[in-house]
């Protein structure tokens, strides 16, 4: 067995070699960094063969987190002693026994531990229950050693807040890591661990995956548990899953965590052979609609447009039928519907916590964007909420009808490469409406899948002329992650991204 020093020491040489799975020969020597050289499936295989111990991997991850967090600021909380105790007590035998893991600090709870959601309003809040997803993660053998940063309540496409500060992109610390799962994406991109928990209510898995050069899948509504205490968020728009370097990690994590939870209002059928089994399968000849125009007519950066068109050419070369086409909808109506659902939800949560704690909501404990959502949310009625829900159900039917002709919709994940820090979040010269316009122009493509409940993935297929990652998004039919994983596996083999890593 290699020493801990060999596990931790020197990652640069191995980072250049890229990410592989368990089939790769076991690295040895002072230049090895298992957390970079192996994906999570590969690390679990090494643990199972006793070639590395869970303690070695955990201490390596902690060492890297402590070394890199001052530069990129991705850690919201540290659960190092809890993780060490979990190993000492004996880990469950699962698909990921001994592999380090980070949770996102947003609506994902460990009983008795901090759950602050990136907000000063929740500073010091401790969870009364453990989330079902956390229980499944730990039953799979993952070792949870901390929580990652998020913007306040996950409301923005950049992870900047006044509780934990700005999370920075490992590819260029002057730029955003995306949001709201920016802490998770920054930690994975920096090489602290090969995959991490993320959530997505309007693009919050896919946006940071695109910004940080990772693979990110937003699953179908009801695929992954979200409770307790609630089994859905933002009227069903929110979903939980992961960002990762490899496609197979992402699929194997879904195998370990999917399924209806107690009290859930809905669920979705999974393939009998599981999701990991899909990754190596040929997807067949898919009918792919290419959507490069922003639904609202806002501008799309030429490099992001070009990345999507190049991905379309790649798909065509792999035997798929590719056609320029996109569903039509009233962007103003569905945009307002999402504001009603999100604003009402945020306003209700803040009012309930204020009543329970006596904390007065205001600018000393809440960010300007959140205060804007609260002000809007308080103005809506129950009938407004019902109408907004009806609007999004009509959108889901509209897109489902469009997808009778297509298996997948291909689009840019974002309308621009990762922006400089401070560009999206509210500034003194920008009111709430202007912020909304900024956010919508940056990310006009992602939210549709949240509104309809469809699975959607960002694949790291391109880079900007400035060396920043550019993701390409593929959206499938509701409940059909299997097709997306088959396509993602094919793309990963045809245009591998494992050698494209930031120099940290």
Image (cartoon, rainbow, N blue to C red):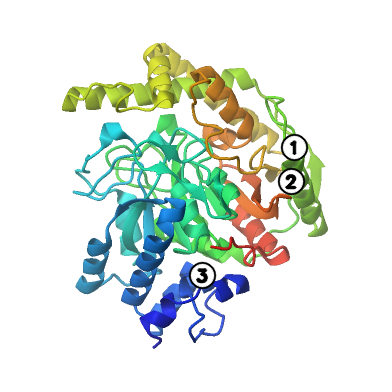
**Residue 364's x, y, as percent?**
30, 25
Indicate the secondary structure of the residue bearing disc 3: helix
* Vertical position of residue 171 compared to residue 359: above or below: below
Front residue of 255/414: it is 414
The residue at the point 59 percent across, 37 percent down is 446
**Residue 253's x, y, as percent?**
45, 60
Indicate the secondary structure of the residue bearing disc 1: loop
In this view, the mark in front (3 or 1): 3
Residue for badge 1: 292
Pick the quarter of the image with the N terminus: bottom left
Ranked by sequence position, the earlier of labels 3 and 1 is 3
Residue for badge 2: 308
* Vertical position of residue 156 compared to residue 380: above or below: below
Q: Is residue 272 visible?
A: no
* Circles 1, 2 touching at the beta carbon (< 8 Å): yes
Ranked by sequence position, the earlier of labels 1 and 2 is 1
Residue for badge 3: 36
The residue at the point 49 percent across, 53 percent down is 186
Front residue of 404/494: it is 494
Indicate the secondary structure of the residue bearing disc 2: helix
Q: CA distance from mark 2 to mark 3?
A: 28 Å
Quadrant in the rendering for residue 121:
top left
Please tell me how crowded label 2 is: few (under 14), some (14-19), or many (20+) other residues with Cα within 10 Å: many
Front residue of 102/80: it is 80
Residue 380, numbered circle: none
> For this view, does 243 lie left or right of residue 70?
right
* Vertical position of residue 462 compared to residue 161: above or below: below
**Residue 230's x, y, as percent?**
31, 37
């Amino acid at each position: 067995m290699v020493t801990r020093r060999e596990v931790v020491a020197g990652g640069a040489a191995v980072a250049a070699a890229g990410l592989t799975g368990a089939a790769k020969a076991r690295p040895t020597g002072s230049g090895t960094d298992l957390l970079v050289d192996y994906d999570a499936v590969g690390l679990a295989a090494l643990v199972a063969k006793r070639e590395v111990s869970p303690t070695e991997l955990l201490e390596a991850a902690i060492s890297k987190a402590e070394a890199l967090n001052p530069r990129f600021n991705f850690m919201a909380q540290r659960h190092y002693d809890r993780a060490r105790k979990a190993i000492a007590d004996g880990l469950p035998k699962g698909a990921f026994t001994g592999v380090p893991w980070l949770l996102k600090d947003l609506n994902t709870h460990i009983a008795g531990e901090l759950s602050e959601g990136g907000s000063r309003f929740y500073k010091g809040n401790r969870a009364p229950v453990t989330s079902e997803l956390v229980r499944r993660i730990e039953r799979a053998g993952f070792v949870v050693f901390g929580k990652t940063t998020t913007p306040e309540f996950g409301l923005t496409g950049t992870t900047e807040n006044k509780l934990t500060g700005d999370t920075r992109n490992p590819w260029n610390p002057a730029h955003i890591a995306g949001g709201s799962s920016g802490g998770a994406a920054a930690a994975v991109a920096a090489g602290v661990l090969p995959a991490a928990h993320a959530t997505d209510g309007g693009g919050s898995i896919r946006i940071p995956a695109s910004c940080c050069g990772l693979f990110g899948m937003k699953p179908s509504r009801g695929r992954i548990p979200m409770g307790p205490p609630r089994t859905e968020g933002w009227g069903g728009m929110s979903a939980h899953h992961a960002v990762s370097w490899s496609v197979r990690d992402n699929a194997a994590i879904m195998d370990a965590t999917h399924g209806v939870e107690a009290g859930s209002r809905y669920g979705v059928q999974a393939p009998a052979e599981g999701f990991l089994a899909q990754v190596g399968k040929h997807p067949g000849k898919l009918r792919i609609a290419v959507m490069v125009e922003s639904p609202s007519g806002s501008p799309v950066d030429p490099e992001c447009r070009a990345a999507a068109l190049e991905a379309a050419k790649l798909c065509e070369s792999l035997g798929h039928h590719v056609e320029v086409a996109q569903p039509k909808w009233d962007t103003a109506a569905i945009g307002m519907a999402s504001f009603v659902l999100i604003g009402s939800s945020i306003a209700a949560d803040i009012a309930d916590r204020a009543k329970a704690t006596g904390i007065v909501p205001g600018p000393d404990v809440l960010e300007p964007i959140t205060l804007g959502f609260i002000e809007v949310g308080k103005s809506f009625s129950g009938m407004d909420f019902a109408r907004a829900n009806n609007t999004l159900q009509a959108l889901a039917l509209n897109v489902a009808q469009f997808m009778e002709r297509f298996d997948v919709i291909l689009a840019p994940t974002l309308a621009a490469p990762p922006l400089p820090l401070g560009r999206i979040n509210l500034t003194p010269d920008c009111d709430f409406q202007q912020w909304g316009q900024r956010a919508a122009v940056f990310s006009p493509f992602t939210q549709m899948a949240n509104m309809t409940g469809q699975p959607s993935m960002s694949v790291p297929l391109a880079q900007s002329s400035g060396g920043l990652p550019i993701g390409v998004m593929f959206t499938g039919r509701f409940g059909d992650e299997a097709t997306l994983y088959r396509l993602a596996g094919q793309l990963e083999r045809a245009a591998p991204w494992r050698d494209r890593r930031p120099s940290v």
